[in-house]
Amino acid sequence: MEPQEENMTDLLDLQEFDEEALQKESEELLEMRFLTRENARFSRTPGGFVSLKYRDAEYARVGVYLTFPLTEPEEFISIRESDEKAREIGLIQKLSDLDKEQQEMIREQIRLRYFMPVITKVLDVKDEYGHAYWNVMTSFGSCRFTTRMSGDAVVFLGDARLLITDIDGNRYEIPDFYKLSVLERKKLDLFI
């Protein structure tokens, strides 16, 4: 066999190996795993995060995500690895199926991840160089933040509810656009 042919054979063998690994990874991703009090144990880390022991695997830190619908925050909670891939480890079908202490840890993580102040008053919004600079009052006090002027920074969630996402990914809510004063609504004309 010629050297060039040997290299091609080696390359084909490598591609087959990669395909097998990819298929195995795909199967793992598609497998539905439910986390229960029998097979999973959540605990708090010294830094205040949540770790997980699931079957024979241990995860030093996990992420907690709500699945849809968001109106049922105690059901179908996705537990994911905390790295940038955020691969799903499994689902908690019902939070009430866990021990009380573990339920509270998960609820706390949900509150932190989905923290969303309600904007009660729009003091000012300035448009400069493709960004909007907001000065508002929220349910947690006064706040200043910046959004891009693109179409996805302010989104209607129904007839009157607005979701505002700043450049850092923080979210703010205006529950009823029409309850704002005429002057406040005028300041939001840039986005509507």
Image: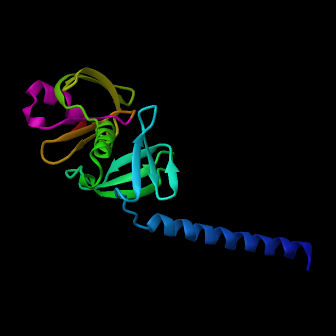
Please report the residue visible at 56 percent of the width from the left and 69 percent of the height from the top.
24
Residue 168: x percent and y percent? 40, 33
Quadrant, the N terminus: bottom right
Q: Position of residue 116 (x, y in %)?
A: 26, 35
Residue 62 can be seen, yes or no: yes
Residue 12 in magenta? Answer: no
Residue 182 falls in which quadrant of the image? top left
Determine whether, in the image, residue 8 is placed left or right of residue 35: right
> In front here: 77 or 71?
77
Q: Is residue 153 above or below residue 29?
A: above
Against 45, is 144 above or below? above
Res 78 → quadrant? bottom left
Q: Residue furthest bottom?
A: 1
Residue drawn 12% across the image and 46% down it: 159
Q: Residue at x 58, y 67 (%)?
A: 22
The answer to whether residue 132 is visible is no
Q: In this rendered view, identify the residue nearer to me: 161 or 151.
A: 161
If the image is split into quadrants, where does the C terminus sit? top left
Count of numbered tags: 0
Q: Which residues are magenta?
A: 169-190
The spot of residue 43 in percent (x, y) is 41, 42
**Going by the image, does 158 lie left or right of 11?**
left
- The spot of residue 111 in percent (x, y) is 28, 38
Residue 177 falls within the magenta-colored stretch: yes
Tell me, what colour scheme is on the image? rainbow
- Please tell me which residue is depicted at 68% across the width and 73% down the height of the picture: 16
